[in-house]
Amino acid sequence: MRFASLGSGSEGNALLISATSGITETTVMLDCGFGLREAESRLSHLHIDPKQLSGIIVTHEHQDHVGGVFRLARRHKIPVWMTHGTFESVRDDAAGVAVHICRDGEPVVIGDLEIQPYTVPHDAREPVQYTATDGIRKLGVLTDVGHSTPHLMKALGGCDALVLEFNHDTEMLSQSVYPPWLKARIGGQLGHLSNQQSADILQSVDRSRLKRLIAGHLSQKNNSPDKVRLAIDEVLGDSAVEVVIADQAAGFAWLESGA
């Protein structure tokens, strides 16, 4: 199993997950917050034709995650999975698309991949994040979440690779030019994870199989890669876990989920 990002941040998000079994390959997209042409261009950079996609899985209805989903799905006849709450928020945009409803605790099987939705606290209608497995390796994804819960910690235990939000540095956010309401929203219980919150999750989650950590959804105005690496180093130290920081402009190239 391998995975790659088209881009990660408040201007657009999309993650590819691919598994191979024999001569078949299954590739799904997790979210698409880019316009049609931009998404197709970024897919091309990762050597993926949109017609190769077996499905698009949506975390929640915010535009940086769902903004390009339906145009891409309609053009290339790609089925889409999302929660009922998310669907109710975007129903008017979904005409002509095969939408399947998923929910916490009920795995979605798409080709060689099993996708497990799990509920997270975020300011959306029915937000979920996902883990994925090909039966051998496990990839966990956690972004767009305001705080940790026992439920999400359990869902992410034992991952071989983990995409984890490091959205903002608390001090940078407090001193930013953002209006008070936006600072409160980002730093609130239904907003986004700070570097320290993410480090605390990383410290507590079962890392017994972890080989790769990808820091994602960094704020371009309220964080920096150096601050993120410092927070991660305080937890991982000299461990053999490979650390990658996702970029808004380019995401990250294909990575294997295991050793």
Image (cartoon, grey):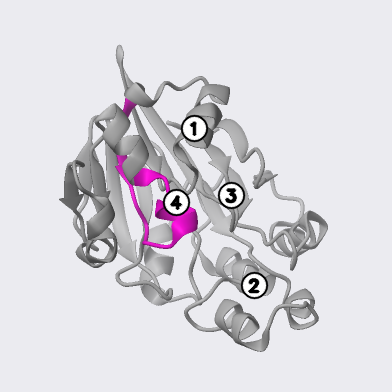
Mark 3 burial class by Cα count in 10 Å: few <14, some 14-19, many 20+: many
Q: Please determine whether, in this image, residue 129 is positioned above or below residue 193.
A: above
Q: Name the residue beneath numbered marker 1.
A: 37
Q: Position of residue 20 (x, y in %)?
A: 35, 22
Q: Position of residue 102 (x, y in %)?
A: 20, 55
Q: Earlier in the sequence, mark 3 or mark 1?
A: 3
Q: Earlier in the sequence, mark 3 or mark 4?
A: 3
From mark 3 to mark 1, how far is it between C-alphas? 17 Å
Q: Amino acid at mark 4?
A: Gly
Q: Position of residue 158 (x, y in %)?
A: 44, 53
Rendered image quadrant of residue 6: top right
Q: Please determine whether, in this image, residue 185 is positioned above or below residue 205.
A: below
| Residue segment shown in magenta | 53-69
Question: Mark 1 falls on what kind of element?
Answer: helix
Q: Earlier in the sequence, mark 1 or mark 4?
A: 1
Q: Earlier in the sequence, mark 2 or mark 4?
A: 4
Q: Name the residue beneath numbered marker 3.
A: 8
From mark 2 to mark 4, how far is it between C-alphas? 18 Å
